[in-house]
């Protein structure tokens, strides 16, 4: 354990401070660093240890994981536990989603006849084609998904309205 603590840059500084007796929180016992009688785990070992505990305990949550490792000193343990539990693919897949309250669900209007609800869009192709048409005016019906398009040369209101009005 002393070798792993010496190799880790974050615990190495803590060991130096403990040897100089600059910190009351950290002490060295047989060249192994402790924080208030809790073993200090180096970063590489602590990440693997947290991941192992998370899987071993049937993918426990962040609070349970923190409760399990409270006997050890791990630098930024809350951030690490949160990142492990939030990035675990199994936990994300299995975790129940919160139910929506009925007041949050909007009443959606569904169409019963074609062209009751349409979506119109203007697409810019960047440069005119051979017929000097640069834009495409599209109209799609939400009920039938019928799509109609008309190439136009200008996106001026009068041009777009004329082509949309003439297609009906």
Image (cartoon, helix red, strand yellow):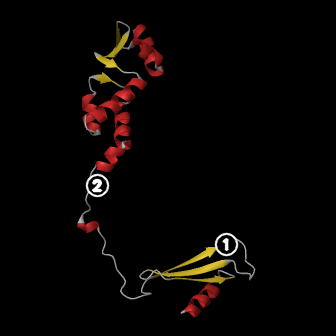
Residue with the mark numbered 1: 125
Which of the marked residues, 2 or 1, is nearer the chain's N terminus? 2
Residue 49 in view, yes or no? yes
Left/right of residue 18 with respect to residue 65 in the rendered view: right
**Quarter of the image where one finds residue 137:** bottom right
In the image, residue 144 lies at what x, y percent?
Answer: 43, 83
**Quarter of the image where one finds residue 91:** top left
In the image, residue 79 lies at what x, y percent?
Answer: 37, 35
Q: How many marks?
A: 2
Label 1 packing within 10 angstroms: few (<14), some (14-19), many (20+): few
Helix, strand or loop status at disc 1:
loop
Q: Nearer the viewer, residue 77 or 92?
A: 92
**Quarter of the image where one finds residue 84:** top left
Can you say which quadrant of the picture contains the N terminus? top left
Left/right of residue 53 with respect to residue 87 in the rendered view: left
Above or below residue 155? Residue 45 is: above
Residue 93's disc is none
Which residue is at 35% across, 6% downward? 30
Helix, strand or loop status at disc 2:
loop
Above or below residue 101? Residue 113 is: below
Left/right of residue 11 with respect to residue 166 in the rendered view: left
Residue 20 in view, yes or no? no
Which residue is at 45% across, 21% downward? 10
Residue 97's disc is 2
In the image, residue 152 lies at what x, y percent?
Answer: 66, 83
Mark 2–mark 1 distance (CA, rounded to whole Å):
42 Å
In the image, residue 95 lies at what x, y percent?
Answer: 28, 49
Which residue is at 30% across, 35% downward? 55
């Amino acid at each position: 354990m002393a070798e792993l603590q010496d190799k880790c840059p974050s615990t190495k500084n803590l060991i130096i401070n403990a040897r100089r007796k600059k910190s009351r929180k950290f002490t060295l016992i047989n060249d192994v660093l402790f924080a208030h009688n809790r073993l200090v785990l180096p970063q590489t070992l602590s990440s693997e240890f947290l991941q192992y505990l998370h899987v071993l305990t049937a993918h426990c949550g962040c609070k349970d994981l923190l409760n399990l490792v409270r006997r050890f000193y791990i630098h930024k343990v809350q951030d690490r536990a949160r990142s492990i539990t939030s990035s675990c693919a199994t936990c994300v897949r299995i975790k129940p989603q919160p139910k929506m309250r009925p007041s949050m669900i909007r009443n959606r209007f569904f169409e019963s006849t074609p062209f009751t609800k349409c979506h119109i869009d203007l697409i810019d192709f960047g440069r005119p084609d051979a017929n000097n048409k640069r834009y495409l005016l599209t109209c799609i019906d939400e009920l039938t998904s019928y799509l109609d398009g008309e190439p136009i040369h200008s996106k001026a209101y009068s041009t777009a309205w004329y082509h949309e009005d003439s297609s009906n």
